[in-house]
Image (cartoon, helix red, strand yellow):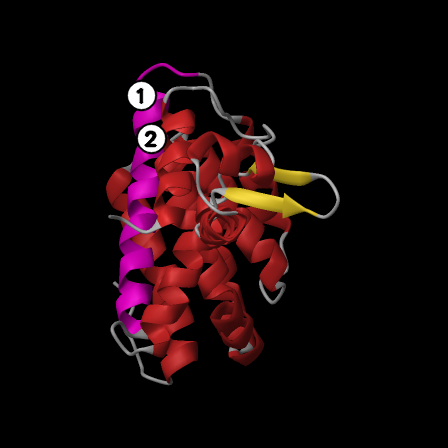
Amino acid sequence: MGREYEKAVDYVRRMISSGSLNVGDRLPTERELSLELDISRNSTREAMRMLENMGIIVSRHGSGNYISGNMERTISDMIHMMLALKQVSRHDICDFRRSMEKTVCHAVIDRLEAGSDKPDELDMAAELAYSMDCSDSETDRRFHYLLVKASGNAFIDILMSALIDVYREWIDEALEAINGDDKLHLKKAHEDIINALHSRDKSACDRAIDMHYNINEQSLTGQLLSFK
């Protein structure tokens, strides 16, 4: 016989899959779930802890448990653990994010070429690109997140949000370390990304993204990377 708490986890999953529970909805109380599923309160409580650790629910003190759908946190925590266990390296994640950034920009171009209205986020990213202080890591994160939102792809949004969170500490280190010339190159890379998106040039996007990540990785690793 399976562990009792699994009955509660499966029950909540089925309710979500059937549309009975959506983001923001309140779950039945632990007592109600225990009676409904004929399991102990301890098992129900264990199931709620597991669902919260998975980012599926959030517990609000004195109010109950609610569907949160915060998958970004779950993915981010998983990546942090893989780093701690040395299953992946910083280099692996940097390479993956570089590739994903290109995927994001290609998705924005595809969206524009499909005849969609220009996303507001693209205009907002453009304003940042031409005015931003490249030593401001928070502004840099916002620029890249706006591009993600402009892609219009919910899965890319979830995955990149998790990567941006993992990358947060590293990019703070990188931007603190870069010199004046590299700050200018980084600003130009941001501007080149925007210009390539406006001209719908995927190859130019890729070159600008490579320039951007070469600067960051050179700062993080101390290795000299040539711009292409």
Residues marked 2 and 1 touching at CB (< 8 Å): yes
| Residue at screen point 63% across, 63% down | 136
| Residue at screen point 30% across, 47% down | 102
* Spatial CA span between label 2 and label 1: 6 Å
Place of residue 135 in the rendered image (x, y in percent of width and height, measured from the top left): 60, 67
The residue beneath circle 2 is: 109
Amino acid type indicated by mark 1:
Glu
The residue beneath circle 1 is: 113
Place of residue 188 in the rendered image (x, y in percent of width and height, measured from the top left): 47, 56
Q: Is residue 148 above or below residue 72?
A: above
SS assignment at label 1: helix
| Residue 95 included in the magenta stretch of the image | yes
Q: Quadrant of residue 198?
A: top left
Q: Quadrant of residue 175?
A: bottom right
41 and 134: which is toward the camera: 41
Q: Is residue 168 above or below residue 131?
A: below
| Residue 103 included in the magenta stretch of the image | yes
Majority SS type along the magenta span? helix
Please give the label number shown on residue 228: none
The boundaries of the magenta stretch are 91-116
Amino acid type indicated by mark 2:
Ile
Is residue 66 toward the left or the right of residue 99 in the image?
right
Residue found at the far bottom of this picture: 222
Residue found at the far top of this picture: 115
